[in-house]
Image (tube, rainbow, N blue to C red):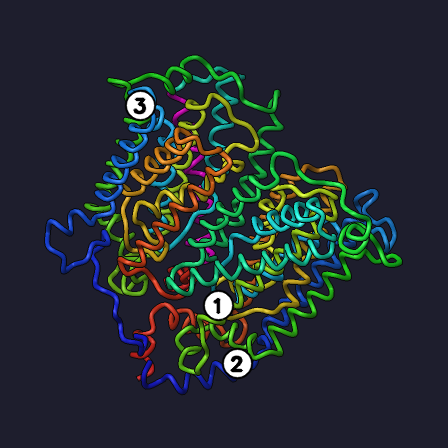
Amino acid sequence: MTLGSSHRLAAIFRSRGGRGSSLDRGWVLALAAILVAEILYFSLTVQGFFAGGSGLLSLTEQFLDIGTLALGLSFVIFAGEIDLSVGAIASLTGIVMAELWKAGLEIWLAVAAAIAISALIGAVNGLIIALFRTNSLLVTLATQFIITSTATALGGGSPPFGFPQSLLSYAGTGTLGPVPAQLIVFAVLAVVVVVIVDRSRFGRALVLAGYNRDAARYTGIDVSRTVVGAFVLSGFFAGIAGIMISAFYNAARDDIGLSLLLPAVTVVVLGGVDIFGGRGRVAGVVVATFVLGFVTEGLLVGGHGSLTATMVTGIVLLLCLVLKLQIDRHEGVSLGAELRRRLGDLFPSSVARSER
Amino acid sequence: MPLVPVTEPRVRLDGAPLRAAPLRRFLLRREILLVLAMVAVALASGLHESAFLTRSNLSFVAADAAATAVLAVGQTIVLLTRGIDLSVAPILGLSAVVVGFLGQNHNLPLGIGVVVSLAVGLGLGVGNGFLIAVTGLPPIISTLGTLSVYGGLQFVVCNAWSPHTVVNIPNSYVNFGNDNAFNGLAWLVVIAAAITAVVAVVLRHTRFGRSLYAIGDDAEAAYRAGIRVRLVLFCAYAACGLLAGFAGLIYLVHTGSADSTTGTDTSVNLISIAAALIGGTTLTGGKGGVVGSALGAVFLSLALTAMVFAGIDPIWEPAGVGALILLAVVSDRRRGGTGSGALTRSAGGAA
């Protein structure tokens, strides 16, 4: 490692450069093809799935909350961490917003305050992880439980409902022409995430910290601060998702976000983001949101139960990832390169030996 | 090795510092700490509310922990290899509903029910093992996928029978769940303890057991030392499934009911991981043991019951679990926990 480090760093930067490799771009295209194929399939076989272009657009309202959670989660996963508390944060944000509004606060002030609190919770997650240098899976597993309890205690007994029309039309079921308001919010958020990850110093630091912690440290990146930043963003996006869910159902419930955690992780992974960090493209996450969302909606509209849809979701995830693994292994030199990279992260000393 | 100087103290497999004196080392073992903590919690609750220390309450606490303990033992086997199994909840659920329906609608004898629960668990565990050891998908992704697949399967199974829920299990099942072996100690607890003991011996004294630790510690080194990494991983996930299947039977006879949301609605996955972590097993592999995990399950049950006795609203039960995990995490750090990354690449790609 000592001898090869400068060489390795150069290689890392050549291959990273803030943009994914051509392989990752290929995966996004493959996902897009799957998306087109499945929309065609459901349109042809399921009665009532294709209710015109606007009908298709309004179906997206059913899963954009998952997409928003997934966008926030990708920051954390890019950095090689994981955040299991996003679902719980989403629930809590909805409840906090509703309670503040019930207490007499203007609705948009309540929204802003609730989202600020969600970012703050993200910061607490990040700080515990950075200060104790401990495992984010553990910490967010723990905080998830604590946040859920808090949400139940605040609003579980009598779920607040009946929000003002302005919130519903801008964040819930409102539309702009044929386009659902939620889709516009999601599009804006997606662009923001792309810019942050691909075009900012923070984004590069994030991806490099996930790709190789030690290399990131040697290049002068403050890894701890980067990780905390990722968790703040994750909490922030979970907060926005929580507002979207509450506005869509016109009610804030304490248990509504928890069920979205695993679909959100599934979207990020299906989008081609390496679960161990450092690799992937935001565009993949965006497309995967629609791939998974339309599969679920297609099955639901076709009269299948939600758990059947869940099962198909799981099968799609596994098939796609086994496929991706095979592509990764067989494309060009990447079998050896990929293995060496994986080994390099796990066993730095053995790579140093082979480099000498 | 990283250029940063390694400052963490060297630790034994069970996590106690190497340099400590023998007595201190013994006292610092997670298992001993847990037992001391349990005694403290029990005494404190007993002083506050004497009903806590009655035989019936304590046996309730133990019986309630039996399913979680068996589940945590299985989870520990894969955690030791630096893996994770997120699908134990639907495996427990599927085993519970399959045996439940066979018992309720077809009067299946209990003995065959046990075999069926083990077979269901083993089959689903083999599915995980195949994905992880053969296709090489990371465990967290494989089991995230099978979590959805098995969860959906559980729903499908429940819809295939009528009525869709298990509410009337045969008397032999109920008796098995309630009968005491001796002195208020339920058979379920005795069986869970026996399973823990057997697995503990297997981990400590068999080639397979030592291979699990070796793979979790350094998969590449294990591979070069001649350990058949993929085969061991395959067996680890199959064993985890097998135990989760049996935990499903325990759940069924203990609660007397099962439906399409059994397991999934009570965050069983996360509780099993929490019990293992509280018991001193780490997510980074190679450290820990099943005795700690089983004790962790009992400790969780005891602490949550103590919360009820202390008059705390059950709403805060999850928060109690969360606080205990955080406590375990922080004390882990003190013992020299891991520094970087949430997940570490497992042996799947290396072998």
Amino acid at pointer 3:
Ser
Amino acid at pointer 1:
Val
Return the chain for callout 3: B
Residue positioned 47% across, 46% down in the render? B86
Determine the secondary structure under disc 2.
helix
**1 vs 2, front mark:** 1
Return the chain for callout 1: A
Return the chain for callout 2: A
Instruction: Examine the image and state in which quarter residue B302 appears.
Output: top left
Residue positioned 71% across, 42% down in the render? A251
**2 vs 3, front mark:** 3
**1 vs 3, front mark:** 3
Majority secondary structure in the magenta region: helix
User: In the image, are marks 1 and 2 on the same chain?
Assistant: yes
For disc 3, the neighbor class at 10 Å (few under 14, some 14 to 19, many from 20) is few
Dot 1 corresponds to which residue? A227
Residue B210 on image: x %, y % = 24, 51
Residue A349 on image: x %, y % = 30, 74
